[in-house]
């Protein structure tokens, strides 16, 4: 494990409501590490299966992680097979949407969507979701793509925090040499 990656345990999932004067709701999990352990807002949270979200609200001993399914979450993304860029935005507790993909791109249900790395939060190439449906609306310049996240937030037990995504290279040497 690289120096800038921290191992943590998920200690709760919170689909919590906030007071009416603030943001209505967030899809988050709570992890057992916080600012005491060097965590800051905006650090990537991953599992061995893929991206979970990012540190949203670090406290001294714990942190809230905003899930990629949260409606305020945005993540730079790539369609793995075509390398076309887009933005993954949260939609509901169980789904996300991939936005801003040109309608001429070849995208099909079952295609894997991975982190793009341009946001300096997530390292490039970690799975985000699988295309569930693609809609080609006639008046839109971009596709409407619904995703099923690869990580089920309700089953998360262990996560990794990437403290400095821009400094890490998680790709194998043979991939980066091409």
Image (cartoon, rainbow, N blue to C red):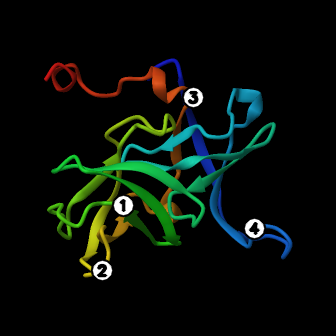
Across and down, in percent, residue 113 comes to: 29, 54
State how far apart marks 4 and 3 are (Cα). 26 Å
The tag earlier along the polypeptide, 3 or 1, is: 1
Residue 139: mark: 2
Badge 3 marks a residue whose secondary structure is: loop
For disc 3, the neighbor class at 10 Å (few under 14, some 14 to 19, many from 20) is: many
Q: Tell me the residue at 70%/70% (across/down).
A: 25
Whether residue 89 sits left or right of residue 111 in the image: it is: right
Residue bearing the label numbered 4 = 23
Badge 2 marks a residue whose secondary structure is: loop
In which image quadrant can residue 26 be found?
bottom right
Residue mark closest to the camera, 2 vs 1: 2
In which image quadrant can residue 62 be found?
top right
Asked if the residue at tag 4 contacts the one at tag 1, i.e. Cβ–Cβ closer than 8 Å, the answer is no
For disc 4, the neighbor class at 10 Å (few under 14, some 14 to 19, many from 20) is: few
Across and down, in percent, residue 44 comes to: 53, 40
State how far apart marks 2 and 1 are (Cα). 14 Å
Badge 1 marks a residue whose secondary structure is: loop
Q: Tell me the residue at 30%/60% (across/down).
A: 101
Task: Work out which quarter of the rendered image holds the C terminus and state it.
Answer: top left
| Residue 172 to residue 105: above or below | above
The tag earlier along the polypeptide, 4 or 3, is: 4
Residue 100: mark: 1
Whether residue 146 sits left or right of residue 22 in the image: it is: left
Between 150 and 92, the one nearer to me in the picture: 92
Asked if the residue at tag 3 contacts the one at tag 4, i.e. Cβ–Cβ closer than 8 Å, the answer is no
The tag earlier along the polypeptide, 2 or 1, is: 1
Residue 174: mark: none
State how far apart marks 2 and 4 are (Cα). 32 Å
State how far apart marks 3 and 2 are (Cα). 42 Å
For disc 2, the neighbor class at 10 Å (few under 14, some 14 to 19, many from 20) is: few
Residue 163: mark: 3
């Amino acid at each position: 494990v690289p120096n800038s990656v921290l191992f943590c345990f998920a200690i709760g999932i919170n689909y919590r409501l906030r007071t009416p004067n603030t943001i209505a709701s967030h899809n988050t999990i709570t992890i057992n590490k916080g600012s005491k352990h060097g965590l800051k807002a905006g650090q990537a949270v991953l599992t061995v299966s893929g991206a979970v979200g990012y540190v949203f609200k670090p406290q001294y001993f714990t942190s809230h992680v905003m899930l990629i399914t949260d409606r305020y979450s945005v993540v730079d993304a790539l369609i793995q097979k075509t390398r076309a860029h887009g933005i993954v935005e949260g939609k509901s507790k169980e789904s996300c949407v991939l936005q801003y993909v040109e309608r001429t791109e070849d995208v099909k249900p079952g295609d894997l969507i991975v982190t793009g790395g341009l946001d300096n939060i997530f390292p490039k190439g970690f799975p985000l979701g699988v295309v569930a449906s693609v809609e080609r609306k006639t008046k839109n310049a971009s596709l409407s793509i619904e995703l099923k996240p690869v990580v089920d937030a309700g089953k998360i037990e262990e996560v990794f925090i990437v403290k400095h995504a821009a400094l890490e290279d998680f790709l194998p040497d043979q991939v980066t040499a091409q």
